[in-house]
Amino acid sequence: MSFLVLYGEEYEEIKRILLQLKEETNSRIALIVEKNGQPIAFIGEVDGVDTTSLGSLVAGNVAATEGLARLLGEQGFSLIFDEGERENLHMTLIASKFILAVLFDKKTSLGLVRLRAKNAANRLEKVFKRLEEKMEQDKEKMGEGESPFEDISEEDIENLFK
Amino acid sequence: MALLNPRQKELICKIVYYGPGLGGKTTNLKYIFEHTSPMSRGELVTLNTQGDRTLYFDVLPLNLGTIKGYKIRFQLYTVPGQVFYSESRKIILRGVDGVVFVADSQQERMDANIESLEDLQENLRQYDYSFANLPYVLQLNKRDLPNIVPAEEMKKILVLKGEPVVEAVAIRGIGVMETLKEVSKLVLLKLKKEMK
């Protein structure tokens, strides 16, 4: 299947875990992106932040680091840390398919972010596993009703460009 | 891999602009960026070398509008065209929902077009993606230049599966939106089929 459905129940749980992580670490933004760059959920001070671009760049960063790992004969790097003058970015890989990223400043410490992110990643891994199982069992339904695109027409698509 | 979020009522798809170096992939994205309302798009992020060539990728988030109450959001990526950035191209292709191949119409670039097209197919094979089922559009760019190969001749060489072909002058915006429309149509109709 070439699409991923974020069912409502799991989506809310992902957001709850992100919110808890953000609050426990006193960080600015916690986000999840799929490894291919698709943004899944963002929590925190996202006003004025281009979250889609942030997600794409996080995914690009992780992908480049993975390439580097392969080149060095490593299986992969499970976490990546970028340190700035004001902002820092901590990225953790979840189940080799998703990335948990935490943006934080001087109000917190790397140690705390690292510890809490690891706990959150373990919980998120279970949610994503459940999501995949649900998709397998429930290929026909889209979680909250029938497929929204069942009866789209070429005209609907043409209208997007008018 | 498209992402469907019923709670947020949105669908997000990934489109990759592929093709030889200096063929006009970034120019396509720049035109779309400059001619779309800021409400309908995010920032155009470019990761360039000092010489202004694409080093890793460009990405432009675009909100196309709504269908059946769902917000349709596309992420447009370009790959670096230069031959030696093969690994980066492979990374960007991961999870792709549709590809636009931007071919350079100049006679001296035909070999580069063919080489890039073979590279695309090889990279798709490595991910076990089926080129036959991939929403795919061929754009013949730079049609305003004097030393170009006739469109019919280019089609004979580059068309691989009866895909839509758009003649373009991306720098002046000619054919850019039409290309995007064609690939959007193919991506959404494929998803419609898969979600049934």
Image (spheres, rainbow, N blue to C red):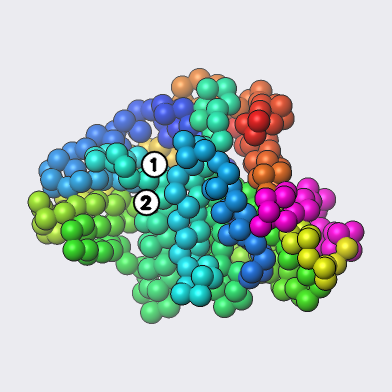
Q: Position of residue B8 (x, y in %)?
A: 42, 29
- Secondary element at image label 1: strand
In this figure, which residue is indicated by the disc labeled 2? A54
Quarter that holds the C terminus of chain B: top right
Q: Position of residue B145 (x, y in %)?
A: 78, 65
Subunit under mark 1: A
The local secondary structure at tag 2 comes to helix
Q: Answer few, some or many: residues within 10 Å of disc 1's Cα (few below 14, many 20 plus, some between 14 and 19).
A: many
Q: Hey, what amino acid is under mark 1?
A: Ile
The disc numbered 2 marks a residue on which chain? A
Given this view, does label 1 or label 2 mark the residue nearer the observer? 2
Residue B61 picture location, percent across and down: 49, 45
Residue B17 versus residue A132 in the image, above or below: below
Locate residue A78: give its quadrant.
bottom left
Residue A2 visible in the shown view: no
Question: Residue visible at 58% across and 26% down?
Answer: B67
The residue where tag 1 is placed is A40
In this picture, which residue range is highlighted in magenta?
B151-175
> From this viewpoint, is residue A41 visible?
yes
